[in-house]
Image (cartoon, helix red, strand yellow):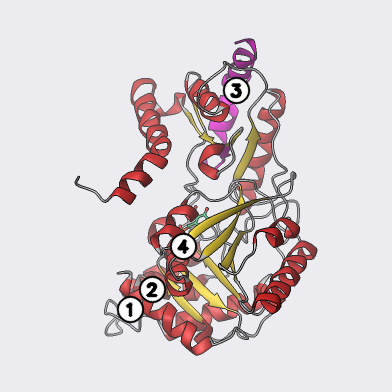
């Protein structure tokens, strides 16, 4: 066999993603891009802010020697210091450059953290519905994913996390603002989670790490602000990136920051830095580190996402599709409407296939460990949302009549 058994199993597990992507391409080739309503990918379509582009030009034009050379594996000291300032302002801690490493996106950051902290068979608790890649990342490093449910309104349920903790628990990953539910966890629930983890650590002698994955921190709506998290629990690690807030996912820049009070910090930071190297990333891309260090306070035009959210929610209301309350990120997580054919597979997969007949692309909830629901990304032009309204209404009417 040309690929390892585990890789083959992963390919099979994620085959619906490839199928969705390939079917979408085929539909666009046959009917034209403008006649296909593709809500499948969370690929930010806004341009980066001018401050970032200017800083990037400055970095490219800099006469300084060694702009494109290797650097310390943890990143440029100036970029680490800028990220420490960012983390301190967002999380109410006094982080310094030594508490941060620059990574290849949040995806790279998560792999670096898991590589550093997991022993074979260690469990990592994640909250369902979850970002589909978590399962792959955890198994990359010999861990076992253990899922617990979010509350019915998709808020954080600290009691459910408490029930899943055991001596094998190495870490808990939370993602807020959440992909796919759009939920922003509130401070009281985060404090309860911190208390649960502290009590568990005291009782069993192993305090699990809290890994906060927050690439959508700045994409929040209705005047909401994502609360600080890592100040509530010393053994916490924040992972984030500029993919969404500066709208530069292709440039692959992220970071890991640890709570300055985390236990055995020097060893942990040495481990993270080494993992960055030996996973083959070596260091985060040099020019973009410089540019983001100079422009991290800028934002892509997040207000546009908020308008799109309201537009898409309006379209779904008319089509009578229920969805979770979207407080942040750029997804609507929706319930498969009643009706539809009896099918051997999940109803969410059947509904996504049905939607394709109306040129609408959506991702079944199965991919997020949450069958019966589906995810729509509104990183699409306003026009796509407007033009899709008739197709949505027809698709649902037709589904109910089957
Ligand atoms: C919840 C979540 N975590 C991590 C990532 C990885 O982002 P990055 O592009 O920074 O690697 C994504 C990307 O969509 C995401 O949705």
Query: Which numbered disc flags the more N-terminal residue, 3 or 4?
Result: 4
| Foreground of the two, 34 or 265 | 265
Q: Which residue is mark 2?
A: 58
Q: Is residue 309 visible?
A: yes
- The secondary element bearing badge 2 is classed as helix
Q: Position of residue 187 (x, y in %)?
A: 77, 65
Query: Which numbered disc flags the more N-terminal residue, 1 or 4?
Result: 1
Q: Are marks 2 and 1 in contact (CB under 8 Å)?
A: yes
Q: Which residue is mark 4?
A: 143
Q: Position of residue 264 (x, y in %)?
A: 54, 87
What residue is drawn where x is 26% and y is 79%? 69
Q: Which residue is mark 3?
A: 392
Q: Is residue 253 visible?
A: no
| Foreground of the two, 385 or 370 | 370
Give the number of the mark in front: 1 or 3.
3
How many angstroms separate mark 4 from mark 2 (CA)? 42 Å
What residue is drawn where x is 44% and y is 63%? 105
What residue is drawn where x is 50% and y is 41%? 367
Give the number of the mark in front: 4 or 2.
4
| Foreground of the two, 369 or 319 | 369
Query: Which numbered disc flags the more N-terminal residue, 1 or 3?
Result: 1
Query: Which numbered disc flags the more N-terminal residue, 4 or 2?
Result: 2
- The disc at residue 244 is none
Q: Is residue 381 magenta?
A: yes
Please tell me whether residue 347 is drawn above or below residue 167 in the rendered image. Answer: above
In the picture, measured across the screen, residue 90 lies left or right of residue 278, that is: right
Magenta stretch: give its range: 375-402
Magenta stretch, overall SS:
helix
| Foreground of the two, 7 or 316 | 7
Which quadrant of the figure has residue 395? Answer: top right
Note whether ligand 1 is within 8 Å of mark 2: no
């Amino acid at each position: 066999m040309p690929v390892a058994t585990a890789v083959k199993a992963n390919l099979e597990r994620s085959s619906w993603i490839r199928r969705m992507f390939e079917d979408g391409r085929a539909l666009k080739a046959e009917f034209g891009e403008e006649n296909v309503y593709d809500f499948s990918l969370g690929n930010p379509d806004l341009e980066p802010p001018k401050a970032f582009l200017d800083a990037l030009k400055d970095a490219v034009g800099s006469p300084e020697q060694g702009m494109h050379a290797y650097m310390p594996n943890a990143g440029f000291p100036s970029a680490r210091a800028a990220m420490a300032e960012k983390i301190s302002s967002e999380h109410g801690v006094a982080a310094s450059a030594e508490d941060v490493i620059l990574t290849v996106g949040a995806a790279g950051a998560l792999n670096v953290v898991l590589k550093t902290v997991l022993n074979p068979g260690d469990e990592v608790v994640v909250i369902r519905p979850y970002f589909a890649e978590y399962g792959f990342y955890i198994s990359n490093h010999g861990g076992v994913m253990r899922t617990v449910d979010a509350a019915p309104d998709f808020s954080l349920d600290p009691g459910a996390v408490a029930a899943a903790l055991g001596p094998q628990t190495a870490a808990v990953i939370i993602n807020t603002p959440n992909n796919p539910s759009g939920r922003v966890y509130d401070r009281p629930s985060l404090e309860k989670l911190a208390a649960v983890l502290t009590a568990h650590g005291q009782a069993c002698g192993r305090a699990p790490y809290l890994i906060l994955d927050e690439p959508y921190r700045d994409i929040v709506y209705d005047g909401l602000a994502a609360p600080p998290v890592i100040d509530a629990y010393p053994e916490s690690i924040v992972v984030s990136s500029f993919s969404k807030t500066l709208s530069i996912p292709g440039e692959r820049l992220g970071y890991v920051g640890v709570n300055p009070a985390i236990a055995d910090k020097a060893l942990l930071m040495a481990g993270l830095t080494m993992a960055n190297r030996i996973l083959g990333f070596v260091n985060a891309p040099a020019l973009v580190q410089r540019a983001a260090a100079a422009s991290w306070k800028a934002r892509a035009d997040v207000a546009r996402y908020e308008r799109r959210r309201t537009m898409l929610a309006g379209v779904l209301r008319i089509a009578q599709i229920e969805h979770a309350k979207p407080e942040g990120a750029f997804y609507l997580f929706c319930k498969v409407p009643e009706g539809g054919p009896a099918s051997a597979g999940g109803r969410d997969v059947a509904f996504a296939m049905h939607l394709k007949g109306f040129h609408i692309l959506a991702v079944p909830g199965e991919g997020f460990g949450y069958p019966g629901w589906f995810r729509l990304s509104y990183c699409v032009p306003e026009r796509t949302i407007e033009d899709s309204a008739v197709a949505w209404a027809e698709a649902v009417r037709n589904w109910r009549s089957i």
